[in-house]
Image (cartoon, rainbow, N blue to C red):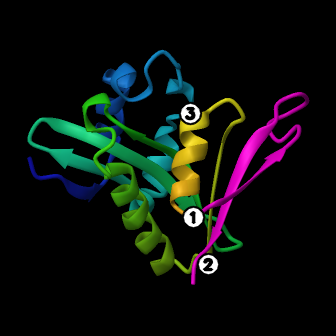
């Protein structure tokens, strides 16, 4: 089944929230799905759409220091392992470059081994930053220069 990458809109965000467990399993990350991000940074928020719905999505933006920041990326449970996450990152990278990004950045929890492995496979460097998300809340910070 063909998948196309489109710009995300608020309706898409509501759709993925309705199907939240298919993207995130038992983890409840609904509070991170901010409508304002899609409204204000729509040119760098993406959905992977197929005939059977949204297979994956990426919410990101470009910061004033020219960093393409990926806030969320997820693929639906039946689309994992297909290369869709990499396709979404490639599309985001191009969109971020058009806005002047010279590097990419993302973060995850220190226990999210899948995310660490995925970002490493995409060529990101990673380091643990203590207290990144507040006292006692370390995060893995991923960075990759765009050449």
Image coords of residue 87 (percent x, y): 34, 59
Instruction: Assign a secondary structure to mark 1.
Output: loop
3D distance between C-alphas at marks 3 and 2: 25 Å
Where is mark 3, residue-wise?
32
Quadrant of res 144: bottom right
Q: Which residue is mark 1?
A: 123
Residue, disc 2? 102
- Taking 104 as reference, is 45 left or right? left
Which residue is depicted at the point 83% across and 42% down? 132
Residue 138 covered by magenta stretch: yes
Q: Quadrant of the C terminus?
A: bottom right
Residue 8 appears in the figure: no
Highlighted range, magenta: 124-147
Q: Earlier in the sequence, mark 1 or mark 3?
A: 3
| Circle 3 residues within 10 Å: few <14, some 14–19, many ≥20 | few
Cα separation, mark 1 vs mark 3, equals: 25 Å
């Amino acid at each position: 089944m063909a998948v196309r990458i489109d710009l995300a809109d608020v309706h898409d965000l509501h759709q993925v929230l309705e199907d939240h467990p298919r993207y995130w399993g038992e983890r409840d990350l609904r509070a991170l799905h901010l409508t304002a991000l899609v409204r204000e940074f729509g040119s760098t928020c993406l959905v992977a759409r197929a005939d059977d719905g949204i297979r994956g999505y990426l919410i990101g933006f470009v910061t004033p220091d020219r960093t393409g920041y990926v806030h969320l990326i997820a693929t639906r449970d039946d689309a994992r392992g297909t290369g869709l996450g990499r396709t979404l990152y490639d599309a985001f990278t191009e969109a971020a470059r058009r806005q002047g990004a010279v590097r990419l950045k993302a973060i995850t929890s220190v226990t999210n081994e899948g995310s660490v492995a995925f970002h490493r496979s995409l060529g990101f460097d990673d380091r643990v930053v203590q207290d990144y998300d507040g006292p006692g809340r370390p995060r893995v910070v991923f960075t990759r220069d765009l050449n």
